[in-house]
Image (cartoon, grey):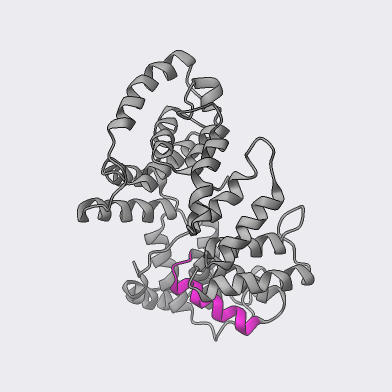
């Protein structure tokens, strides 16, 4: 599904433009709206997107541009393409200068198919560049990082310029850019690569972002170190990623306490401490409760077979110790992902 028919878009646009003009500029949210946004983002990051909508709407209606963008993402992902609700929210975020919302509008053909265009032209990527480049040149880290995406969208894509800004963002301290540089170094044309040279090139970028507290980089460096057979250090980063809320790190602790010698887990669990099935069961139950749908039934059955009834009972008594820790569990989805 791309966009509703042209007449529907045009009818909506008249009201949408007026609405956008009446919206307040983004400002600090009051306590109630901030709590709503935090809960909406928690649910979104846990892939509970449909549940996140009313919370994000409250923040968006209070003027939060990030919430507007993510409401666009919720509707786009739920409908596997641009629909009217996604269009409306992306457009509102774009009106407040969000460059990624502008790129989403371009991807959805909003200007070409629906006359939902920038104020002074018909080129959303160019509008994103014009609003973002001055901010990046003034030292804004998020704008520097956004230019990496924008330069692949402009009329004459410039990979060198994109990489220049990505490196500048990373060198200035943007952890998402550091992590992305690590992924670029690690991956080949087909995606994830286990080539030693690539892994060693990726490690410094992942390490810098991980040491700065960025959970996805902790997850990535743990995988790199494991593939380089540096298992003890890999374990330390998996534990740290769990403590930082990354669901992969928490799952690793659960799995390696329950089934460390199972064929599918043997390599994954190298470097793990002595297994404790009751502890692993407690962690698994906590993950399952905090993030519904995080374990397929088949996986749960495999784990259950390796935990005695006594161990399960002991684990259930420890459940509260692992439930709803701070920060909350997250998949850490990319802001401008697929």
Q: Residue at x 29, y 36 (%)?
A: 23
Horizontal side of 55 relative to 8 (left or right) equals left
- Residue 63 in the image, given as x and y percentages of width and height: 29, 43
Instruction: State whether residue 332 appears in this view.
Output: no
Instruction: Place residue 124 in its image quadrant.
Output: top right
Q: Residue at x 59, y 47 (%)?
A: 149
Position above or below: 109 against 76: above
- Residue 112 in the image, given as x and y percentages of width and height: 56, 22
- Residue 116 in the image, given as x and y percentages of width and height: 47, 25
Q: Nearer the viewer, residue 186 or 27?
A: 27
Q: Nearer the viewer, residue 314 or 29?
A: 29
> How many badges with numbers are in the image?
0
Horizontal side of 16 relative to 337 (left or right) equals left
Q: Is residue 236 magenta?
A: yes
Position above or below: 155 against 218: above
Position above or below: 322 against 152: below
Instruction: Place residue 152 in its image quadrant.
Output: top right
Q: Residue at x 42, y 17 (%)?
A: 10
- Residue range in magenta is 231-246
Q: Magenta span: helix, strand or loop, mainly?
A: helix
Horizontal side of 59 relative to 190 (left or right) equals left
Instruction: State whether residue 291 appears in this view.
Output: yes
Q: Residue at x 29, y 46 (%)?
A: 59
Q: Is residue 318 magenta?
A: no
- Residue 96 in the image, given as x and y percentages of width and height: 39, 40
Q: Quadrant of the C terminus?
A: top right
């Amino acid at each position: 599904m791309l966009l509703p028919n042209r007449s529907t878009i045009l009818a909506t646009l008249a009201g949408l433009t007026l609405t956008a003009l009446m919206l307040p500029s983004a400002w600090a949210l009051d306590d109630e709206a901030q709590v709503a946004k935090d809960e909406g983002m928690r649910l979104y990051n846990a892939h509970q997107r449909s549940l996140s909508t009313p919370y994000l709407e409250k923040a968006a209606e209070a003027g939060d541009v990030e919430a507007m963008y993510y409401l666009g993402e919720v509707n786009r992902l739920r409908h596997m393409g641009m629909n009217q609700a996604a269009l409306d929210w992306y457009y509102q975020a774009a009106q407040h200068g969000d460059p990624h919302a502008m790129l989403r509008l371009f991807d959805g053909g909003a200007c070409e198919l629906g006359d939902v265009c920038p104020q002074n032209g018909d080129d959303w990527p160019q509008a994103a560049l014009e609003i973002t480049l001055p901010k990046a040149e003034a030292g804004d880290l998020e704008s520097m990082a956004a230019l990496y995406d924008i330069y692949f969208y402009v009329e004459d894509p410039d990979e060198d310029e994109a990489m220049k800004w990505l490196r500048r963002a990373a060198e200035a301290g943007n952890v998402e850019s550091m992590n992305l540089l690590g992924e670029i170094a690690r991956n080949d044309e087909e995606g994830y690569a286990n080539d030693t040279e690539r892994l060693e090139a990726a490690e410094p970028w992942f390490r810098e972002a991980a040491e700065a507290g960025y959970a996805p980089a902790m997850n990535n460096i743990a995988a790199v170190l494991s593939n380089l057979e540096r298992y003890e250090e890999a374990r330390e980063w998996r534990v740290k990623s769990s403590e930082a809320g990354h669901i992969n790190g928490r799952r690793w602790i659960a799995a390696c306490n329950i089934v460390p010698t199972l064929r599918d887990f043997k390599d994954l669990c190298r470097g793990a401490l002595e297994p404790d099935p009751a502890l692993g069961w407690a962690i698994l139950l906590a993950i399952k409760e905090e993030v519904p749908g995080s374990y397929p039934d088949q996986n749960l059955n495999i784990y259950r077979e390796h935990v005695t009834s006594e161990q399960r009972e002991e684990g259930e008594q420890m459940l509260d110790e692992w439930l709803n820790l701070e920060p909350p569990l997250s998949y850490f989805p990319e802001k401008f992902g697929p």
